[in-house]
Amino acid sequence: MKPGRFSYHAPGSLPEALDLLAEYGDEAKVLAGGQSLMPVLNFRLAQIEHLVDINRIGAEYATPRADATTVTIPALVRQRQVERSAELTGALPLLGEALHQVAHPQIRNRGTICGSLAHADPAAELPTVMSVLDSTFTLASTRGTRSVEVADFFQFYFTTALEPDELLVEVSIERPAPGTVTVFREFATRRGDFALAGVALSARFDDAGTVTDCRIAVAGVAATPHRLTGVENLVNGTTLGADVLGEVAATARAEVDPTGDIHAGADYRRRLTGVLVTRALTDAAGQASTEREVSHA
Amino acid sequence: MTLGSGKFIGTGMTRREDHRLLTGKGRYLDDLDLPDAAAAAFLRSPHAHARIARFDATEARALPGVLAVFSGADLMEIQKPLAPKVLHPELKDFPRLPMPPVEVHYVGEPVAVVIADSRYVAEDALELIDVDYDVLPAVASTAAALAEGAPLAHADAESNVAVRLRQRSGAPEEALRTAPHRLSGEFQIMRGGGHSMEPRAVAARFEPATGQVTIWDTTQSPHYARQQLSVIYDMPEDDIRVIAPPDVGGGFGPKAQFYGEEVVVPWLAIKLGRAIKWVEDRQENFVSAMMERSQTHRIEVGFDDEGLLIVVRDIIEHDQGAYCAGLQVPSITTSTVPGPYRIPNIQTELYACYTNMVPTSSVRGAGRPQAVFAMERMMDRIAEYLGLDPAEVRSRNLIQADEFPYQVGIMFRDGSPLTYDSGDFPALLNGTLGRLDYPAARAEQEKARAEGRYVGIGIAVYVEGCGLGPYEGAKVRLTNQGKILVTMAAAGQGQGYETVYAQVAADALELDMANVVVTTGDTGRIPFGQGTFASRITATAGPAVFDAALQMRERLLDTASRMIGCDPGDLSFAEDRVCLNSDPGKSVSLLDIARTANIGKHGITLTKGIKPGIETVSYFAPARAAYASGAHAAVVEVDPETGGVQILRYVIGHDCGNVINPRLVDGQVLGGFAHGVGNAMYEEPVYDADGQPQATSYLDYSLVSAAEVPPVELFHLHTPSPLNPLGAKGAGEGGTIPAPAAIANAIEDALRPLGARINYAPMTPARVADAAFAGTTEKSQPC
Amino acid sequence: MPDRTEDGHHITVTVNGTGYRRVVDDRLTLADFLRERLRLTGTHLGCEHGVCGACTVIVDGAAVRSCLMLAAQADGTEIETVEGLADGPELSPLQRAFQENYALQCGFCTSGFLMSVTAALREQPIRDEAHARDVLSGNICRCTGYTGLVRAVLEASAAAEQQPAGAGVGPKEQAK
């Protein structure tokens, strides 16, 4: 399990990195945290000619930024860095909650947020989380810089809007509006495993407990993180009473078409999706009600 | 000296191995510095069954850094069968060749080997070898293998059945016909692997000057490996030295087997005149290290109104894999079914099938977990059917403490009648239930059920044949440095032999442990041995060490008495000296004795009566296997919607006879239990129908971490074995054996309100949830 | 960035307080660099895909898998391996806790556990069993069933809390 031959490049700046990507295109692969890429290389599952290690492009890419409206996470921010920042997890509790369930600390110490997003494993936590947040991806190449909304970023299994010569420079996430409740739920066989199914939820509740702007994305049951618009429509405008919650699972099941694998069949994953979405909504309603009680107390 | 009067046996001594292992100074095979050693890498079959049509390594040979490439056909001189360990007259055996030149029978079978300057380059070369295969049909389960018109795992076979093993006692057919009640069940246990954290490895160096080849091998059985090589190479055993390195990173069974790589690597070291090292990587380990477990049991029990067993009949399909590495596992399965119960009529019938998957052999538990799973699932079903408590049904059927030796009526795999030597099964079961506070646990369960929670309790009791023959041995020598050196043939993989056998020897010698050094696993140091497997070393090598050390004590006292001029009976040890009881000032040290009797003075006559050369040897051959036993109880909570299972409590009662180091025995049992949890809920090397392995990384093959293994309440009984002077039995596998059964019983119990049936191990979330969802569809029906 | 010549990348690393300058091939992993080039063989390879944790070392204060890093990437870093934990023959408090609690058998996974736990204890104390199991869950042990490991972690953490800040987590390096 030794990697095959490749040329290792460690550009010292973003322009240098982009030049290399422009030069080598399809033959190059970006190395950030390496926690998904290095196993692929060790298994020799992919033959890569040029490895562009971006870890030395500059300290500014390893520093998250937060202002009144937006949190920006550049390419070299490690997952553990966000997880251990009270400021960032306070701003984006959903991200904090999900990060705890990404593999193990030793992996999160190296693994980057942007790397996980660019890798686009549909069973992974972070792409699913981004799918319910107002997140914008900044893609750079020697041709220029462009912004892509999350809805357009994830395209297929391990496939994103990134062109071969482009680098995901940062992801910007708007702070959720006041009154927003978020929940991350997943079910995995073991601690740290990829989820058999997972759900990220963001919803706003008004003073009467009525849901607005509910966003639900599920992991592990489609080729990309998958928004459940049917369930969102079902619950928006309701107070999540038992009658509505009772319909959630069936609605969710109808919205996914998972494939089975050696860990679980399609039927199980479909049922699990219904279960997790129902539980996530129940959690959210509980959280919202607690918060109302606190604010009215 | 009598057993138990010493200071060390029975004491939790700190391990001598630990300091080097904790400081990174262990010497595992890949850590051994063999200057200028080349690296080997094996090309492995990508097909489950195929004929090699064309082999071209031209490009690979031309790669800079590559020293040589050999296909199987290039090494015909070593293409001799790797013989099965345990045979049967009716076995249809297909030769397992080190590197088959013509036909391959499983994905991962070695096809060619590259020798290169580094493993990196060797792997580069593998990618340049061009092989054309004619792909043949494959079978990848016992069900597929036994189906009518099934493809043949070996193209020239008549059927896929390797052998049919039958055991019977009493009149089972008649008993089944007349039993007041009968229940049947079908249970399937999937494959599982050993997964020692250090994979396999072999290194070798040939000395042309002496004609000797030295082989470092992570094997559990260096003497067995030497014997196989001696036959295959047609070399006297004295020219082959097999050394299991001082540190081997776990064994668990697969390293007790003998593999083609162990033949090819040393042979090429001889042929090329260059030291070669091969370290199996995890990817190879997944497709080439032997596995175990997969069996299907169709079991039927007959019993009376009180739940007393009258008969058990178990028809078993056993997955032998692509070749028969031996019938030890299926043999053990057939004799483990009856367990701790009085069963007047027994019939087991096992069909060992060839399939196009990695060959199977022992993995921690070795055929026992499957048998216990089938039997203990049926004990619960009997209780359910009669409306009795499952603990009560077990209790009524247990062999009682005054019934030993107990003849079960069938044979064990060691060739002797299955005769339990000692034990106290009621005390084990009651002790386990007591620690669980069983009535309180049942009350908790009722309460949970009323709250809509799914809590269940599972029990499993087992008997484990261990301490198998034929023999194990030890040499004890007074070294020229004045230390007592214990040399054992057995090779350890983390069991703490250097500590345990120093304890045994020190007590026999009545010397402090500080004077004793233990060395293991080197055929150059002791000529005869068998190996570490079947939880056998404490019960076989232990008595040998003890006896050789007793002899050594006599030799030391005798020599000292001649040196001091007194009677040996007037002497005793104080630290490293032998002193005259009446005048401790008169003494000789161990070093003085060594100087006198071992080193001597050239040409000077030895003092009259002193016997030169202070070395003793003992080989212990048990009359038959000893039987350890245990009872496990689990309390679980199941989420029927996700299939998630949480083990809330787990109690283990364990009886392995007298123990040498209780802390190390605890470690063995708890480690075995974690393996059992893996078998129960997580581990499965899935193959598809074409024999392609689907779980070949630790992302897909789930080993348990600390987060999955629950805390365990562990207690011991010590009913000594009468079969060896230490009264010891084996401890290495008992933790594993009943865990899947206990957990399955608990899960089914938890889901009883839903009528779910748990018939598979591992019980993955999807299987549990599917069973809960399917509800009542698979109940055992009275027949 | 590491200088590249025809021979490879010229890297400078500090391992257990000692500086090394070496030329490494593009694809040499950090694990193989430590084991084969520096002959620090206490770091073990159990899976080479980042799951088993046997190869865990501490790089610039963070526990990472050395099988998933290239040696060239380590240029300029400070690395701690199992060989650096003890002070001469004197075991570190964590190593001692491992020994006293029988937290190892074959020892192959042990270095990885020691490095993971050493890093975790520098971050915060580990006071309960659930936390200990969580910290340990990134490493696999096939021998012990984890009971001794859990006890060792709790004991080492409790001992460190009774010591002046930072004691008990390795004699040479403190969290930076």
Image (cartoon, grey):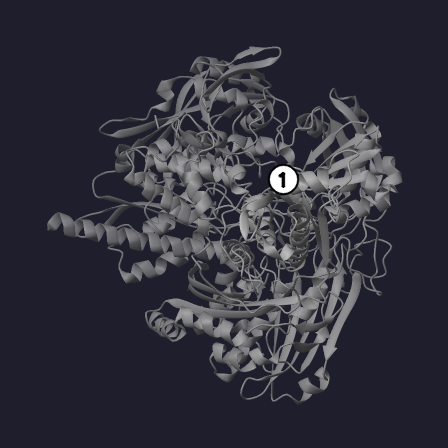
Depth check: B157 or B363 in front?
B363
- Residue A112 on image: x %, y %: 42, 30
Local crowd size for mark 1, using a 10 Å CA cut-off: few (<14), some (14–19), many (≥20): some
Depth check: C78 or B493 in front?
B493
- SS class, disc 1: helix
Depth check: B300 or B589 in front?
B589
Q: Is residue B479 visible?
A: no
- Where residue A40 sits, quadrant-wise, is top right
Q: Please name the residue that numbered disc 1 is placed on.
A: B591
Where B463 falls versus A239 (above or below)? below
- Residue A281 on image: x %, y %: 31, 53
Where C146 falls versus B119 (above or below)? below
Q: Residue at x 35, y 74 (%)?
A: B443
Depth check: B485 or B264 in front?
B485
Q: Residue at x 48, y 61 (%)?
A: B769
- Where residue B125 sits, quadrant-wise, is top right
Q: Residue at x 75, y 48 (%)?
A: B611
Q: Chain of mark 1?
A: B
